[in-house]
Structures are given as C-alpha cells and as structure tokens.
Image (spheres, rainbow, N blue to C red):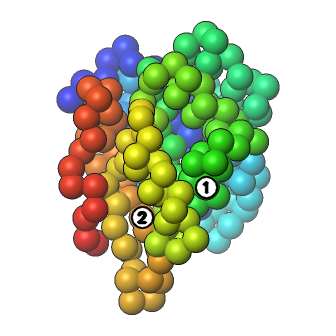
Amino acid sequence: MELAGKKVGFALTGSHCTFAQVWPQLQTILSLGAEVIPIVSPAAESTDTRFGPAAEWMRSLTEMAGRQPIKSIVTAEPIGPKKLLDILVIAPCTGNTLAKLANGITDTAVLMAAKACIRNQRPVVLAIATNDGLGMNARNLGVLLNTRHIYFVPFGQDDPAGKVSSLVAHMELLPETVAGALEGRQVQPVLRSY
C-alpha cells in the first residue's frame, strides 16, 4: 500500500477517548508518503478532557502533519473549488458529526471539508466512535452507509454489555480503508466484532 503524492485531509472530531488509537494510524498514513492536511472540529480543538489537554493534542497534530490545522469554515471553504484533497478522513467521527453529515449540516471546518470532497466526487472515510450508533444515530448511519463516496473503517460494538448502542471503528484498519477508498472499494466486512 502506497499513498505517495496523495493529499489526505485528516479531520479530528471530539471523541477524545479514541485520539490515542488514531495517532498511530495518522503516523502510518504519513509514513506511506501522504501529504496530510489536518482539520479539526471546535470540540477537538478546544476541549480539555481526562484524555489530555486540547493544546497538547493540537501541538502533536501540527508537529506530525508539519502544518497548522484548518479550524474554521472560512479556511476550509477553498477545499472544494480548488480541489485541495484527494481524500478526507474523519477519525474519530463522532455521532454529532455523523448526524450532521447525514442531514446536510455544515457548521464546522470538518463538515465543510466533507461537503467539498463529496462535491468533487472524492472519497470521505469515516472512522466512527459514538455511544449512540445503534440508538438515535442508527438512522444516520444507515443513510451514510448508502451514500456515494462515503466509506467506513470497519466497526463494531466496543462494549455490548455496558454500552449497548456504542459503535467504534477498528482504527488499525484506517490505512487499509483509505487505500481501498482511493480505489473506490469499501473494505469488507464492515461489521466486525471486538
């Protein structure tokens, strides 16, 4: 698998508990030769949690990508008309982002980047991490599973006994999913157990 010369938008949303799982996958994508353009949601950019201070995550992301993240709708807007990305990855993709994407709401830089890629018929890869994937967000998941240019990192119930509606992507499959999406192919099976 090689991503040399590919411009990969790498968008981070607010499932802070999965950041540590996402970071090695971002490193792998970089090591495969991709140029990474980081994009962050307001929650990812500014929320301090027990998983670490936001400033530290942003510093690390900037250092890894070698550039400042796109943080606003205004700075994300040129992605569409200038066709700046070959692919967009949203990892982690929260239930909030999932719902807004499924319903055409564009109120963050991440969602503007997704809208731009879909407009340009470029793939968008979602690595979901949501406590309500089999609850209120199930309908949005269904919509996006059937939406052209949307690809999913295979996912499953991470804690079926304790959090029956929770779904989390197998983050270790992110690079493989990106490579498949660039070929127009969804990695199968999409549903996998933990």
Looking at the rendered structure, the secondary structure element under dot 1 is helix
* Relative depth, front residue between 166 and 60: 166
Q: Which residue corresponds to the image point at 28% horizontal and 55% vertical from the top-left? A: 190
Name the mark on residue 83: none
The residue under label 1 is 99
Q: Residues within 10 Å of mark 1 (few under 14, many from 20)?
A: many
Distance (Cα) linking label 1 and label 2 = 15 Å
For this orientation, the residue located farthest to the bottom is 161
The residue under label 2 is 168
Q: How many marks?
A: 2
Residue 183 visible in image: yes
Q: Which image quarter is the C terminus in?
A: bottom left
* Relative depth, front residue between 96 and 159: 96
Kind of residue indicated by mark 2? Val
Q: Which residue corresponds to the image point at 44% horizontal and 41% vertical from the top-left? A: 147
For this orientation, the residue located farthest to the top is 82
Q: Which image quarter is the N terminus in?
A: top left
Kind of residue indicated by mark 1? Ala
Question: Which sits earlier in the primary sequence, circle 1 or circle 2?
Answer: 1
Looking at the rendered structure, the secondary structure element under dot 2 is strand
Q: Which residue corresponds to the image point at 28% horizontal and 62% vertical from the top-left? A: 191
